Amino acid sequence: MGDSDLGYLPGLIIDRRDFFRVAGTLTAGAVLPLACRTPVPSVSPPPFVHGVASGDPLTDRVILWTRVSAPAGVRQVPVRWEVAEDPGFGTVVARGWGMTGARQDFTVKVDVTGLSPGRTYYYRFDALGQSSPIGRTRTLPVGSLERLRLAVCSCANYPQGFFNAYAHIAQRADLDAVLHLGDYLYEYGRDGYGGNAGLGRDVEPVHETVTLSDYRERHALYKSDPDLQAAHQQHPFIAVWDDHESANDSWMHGAQNHDPATEGAWLNRKAAAIRAYHEWMPIRTLPGDLSGGRIYRAFRFGNLADLVMLDTRLGGREKQGDRDDPRALEDPNRRLLDATQEAWLQAQLDNSMEAGTRWRLLGQQILMGSMSGQGQPVNPDSWDGYPGSRKRLLGHLSQAEIRDVVVLSGDVHSSWAMEVAQNPFSEEAYDPNTGRGSLAVEFVAPAVSSSPLGTFPGAESLLALDSRRPHIRWVDVHARGYTILDLDETRAQAEWYFLDTVERRGAGERFAAAFASAHGENRLLPVSSPSQQRVAAPALAPVG
């Protein structure tokens, strides 16, 4: 196997003779178990400046990630890894080794199998004679599960603010996973959106990301942030891309922020963005994922929740419409999800109901609930811009009697709690007083650091919660932060935590609001206080 295998086919290792041959050119200590490693002189730069991460947990496996900063001129680096039941590595349950190199930008992805369900594990890597920080991860449970706690976040623009939301998420020891709903990074250069916020967080490269090396460099910049590193170190991530991981308002065959005349073919840029994402994110890369760009997938948290992660961007989305051409926007044949993903989604929902799972979670990028009734303008970059896709999904929920659906969204740099109905503006179809006609509830997470929606012209009108928007229970368009989703058998509760500021690192947070939907009701009611954190949560990974 060549030096690319570790990055693209997780868990595979190279021929043993190749391993020792390359290891001999670096340090003999790197091939020993981590506990027995022989100290060697430090290298410059340090090998693990981008931290460690884990993601895409299943009941018996999880993806582990890191990146080795190799000295100039080194083409291949042997890497060892260990997984243990305790942060002191007294009980090691798995270990292995492999090779990384320039072809995958020295990133490392390992699909560790043979783990036990519903367990917290600790892991570390070793390369160039040094050990990485210790990471902490968790597998998915099986069978009966009383409670599930997830952090939900999106929209982190590096130059626009410090990642204090990630710092607070990292300190929550009782989370099962972090859901990142996209805009993990932004493609703009220093003269683009958010690039001149004056906080000393300049982007690299200085220009807009277009090529593979550009996207790699931008991912490296984001992974250098200590607060993002902390969140990855403590929790497994389940992530999907939105548009800015490639370019603003991207779709299958182009993007608003892509000019073929100066930036080349969109397919080349799209392929570069997808490849860099798979290299730098702790996501399971399966055969065909790089060439086909498929990212939608599902996760089961015992009998309590099925999580379905959608791709409303690159996987089959048709070009975004024009808000000034409402007739074209209403075309029922325009698709947000292609036919394959749409059929897959319906099958996932059907199978979840048949299995008796308590809740169905849809993790996806853009606002699903309707905002375009009662003469309000259409946001074409939402499910409003693809009414045929939403009608088919909600129609399936109704006809197949799919209940207890929770939609988790990001993208709009604001916080929302709403009920999702086919036509929330019709008194015959929907009753806001009882929830009749509501087919799901939607919780929208605020931005981690990107400009709040309230800073954009005309956004203040969205604060008017009146008869024009009877299905919206709460909205905030000013604050940044994140959401906690707390599930048990009786209710699904979302809690919003807002940051004091993003203009300095280490700022505090406050509980802002909470709404819950009782099992079987698809109706939101306010909750006065946050849920209790779990007691005796597994220890966080050691810091420093």
Image (spheres, rainbow, N blue to C red):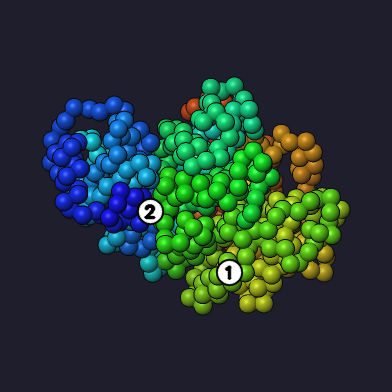
Q: Quadrant of residue 44?
A: top left
Q: Nearer the viewer, residue 20 or 328?
A: 20
Q: How many marks?
A: 2
Q: Tell me the kind of residue under disc 1.
A: Thr
Residue under label 2: 8
The x, y position of residue 64, in whole percent, is 34, 50
Dot 1 and dot 2 residues touching (CB under 8 Å): no
Taking 462 as reference, is 399 left or right? left
Quadrant (top left, top right, bottom left, bottom right) of the N terminus: bottom left
Residue under label 1: 340
Distance between the alpha carbons at the discs numbered 1 and 2: 24 Å
Q: Residue furthest right?
A: 375
Q: Quadrant of residue 520?
A: bottom right
Residue 487 visible in the displayed image: no
The x, y position of residue 486, in whole percent, is 51, 54
The nearer-to-camera label among 1 and 2 is 2
Q: Nearer the viewer, residue 185 or 524?
A: 185
Q: Residue at x 52, y 46 (%)?
A: 273
In this rendering, is residue 355 above or below 445? below
The x, y position of residue 90, in whole percent, is 18, 47
